[in-house]
Image (spheres, rainbow, N blue to C red):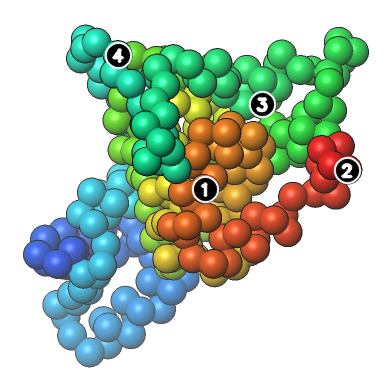
Amino acid sequence: MTSSIFKSRQVTFLIGPNRVEFNVHQYAFTRLSAPLRAMLAEDAKESVEVGVIWDDVEPSTFTSLLEYAYTDNYSVPRLPRKKSVATAAVVLPNQADQGDAIDEEDWWSVSSIMTWMMDNDDRFGDCTRFGKWCYGRKYFDTDFPGPQPYWHDELQRSDCTGLATIFMLHVKLYALADRYRFMSLRALCLQRLRESLVNVVLRTEFCETLVEMLAFAYANTPPGDDLRMMLLRYCIFQMNHLKRHGYLYQLVLEMPPQFAAELLLEVPQGLWESAL
C-alpha cells in the first residue's frame, strides 16, 4: 500500500481562506474516498496539474486528514497542565443577574460517565437509577479492550486544560470525513469522540466545549446524523447537571430551535416514567 501511495502523482490542495498549499499523493486519498476518486479522475482528464480548493476547511483539520490518509491513524494532542492560580468563583449562565456564584469545586461532585456507570453498576444490586444506567450502557459502553490511550486519563484530570482542542479535532475531522466519505476515518472519529465523552468530567471548561461542539454539529450535520445524536445523548445522560447549573438553559437559548425538539423527543420513555 505504501509504495502505491508514493508512486501515485501529486495533487495540490489549497486549504482555508488563505489557500495554504498542500501536495498530496493522489492514491493516499483515492484509496479511502470514492467521491475524491471520481473527482480527481475527472480532473486528470482535463489537466496534468490538478488543484483542489477547500477554502472552508481549516489547515489543522486537513493536516489530521493527511496523517490518516498516509498512516490510517491521526494524533490526539496532549493536554497542557493548568497554571497554578487561586480558584475563582463561577457565575452561572442563567443566574448572572442574581449574582449567584459558586465555587469551582461545588458542583463538580458530578463524575464522568465512566465513573458514574462503575459506581452504579446493577450487578451489585444497589443501582437507584436503573433507567439511566441502561441508557448509558446502550449508548456509552465503557468496556474498552486493550491498554487505554493517554488521553483517557488526561480527560479525567482536574489539572488539565485545552479540552476544546481535542474534542473539536474529532468533531471537525468527522465532518470532513463524512463529507468526502472517508468511512473508516469517520468511524474512528466517532469512536474517539464517544470514548472522550465517556471519560471527560463535566467541569466548566467542558460545558463550554459541549456548547461549541453542538453549535458546530447543528451548523454542519443533518437531523439524525451520528455525531449530532451522540452529542444529544450525552446531554440526556448529563441533563440533571446541565440543567442544575444553567447550561441546558444556555443551550436551549443559543442552539437552533430543533435542538430543544430533538433533545425532548430523544429522551426514552423509560426515563420519563422513572422521573415523572
Q: What percent of the width, then of the height, locates residue 3?
A: 31, 50
Would you call the spot at circle 4 few (<14 residues within 10 Å), some (14-19), or many (20 or more)?
few
The residue located at (27%, 87%) in the rendering is 45
N-terminal of the pair, mark 2 or mark 1, is: 1
Q: Quadrant of residue 215?
A: bottom left
Mark in front: 4 vs 3: 4
The residue type indicated by label 1 comes to Tyr
Query: Disc 1 designates what residue?
Result: 249
Would you call the spot at circle 3 few (<14 residues within 10 Å), some (14-19), or many (20 or more)?
some
On residue 142, which mark appears? 3
Quadrant where the C terminus sits is: top right
The residue type indicated by label 3 comes to Thr
Query: Disc 2 designates what residue?
Result: 273
N-terminal of the pair, mark 3 or mark 1, is: 3
Residue sitting nearer the eye, 106 or 100: 100
Query: Disc 4 designates what residue?
Result: 87
In-image side of 21 versus 154 (left or right): left
Q: Is residue 177 visible?
A: no
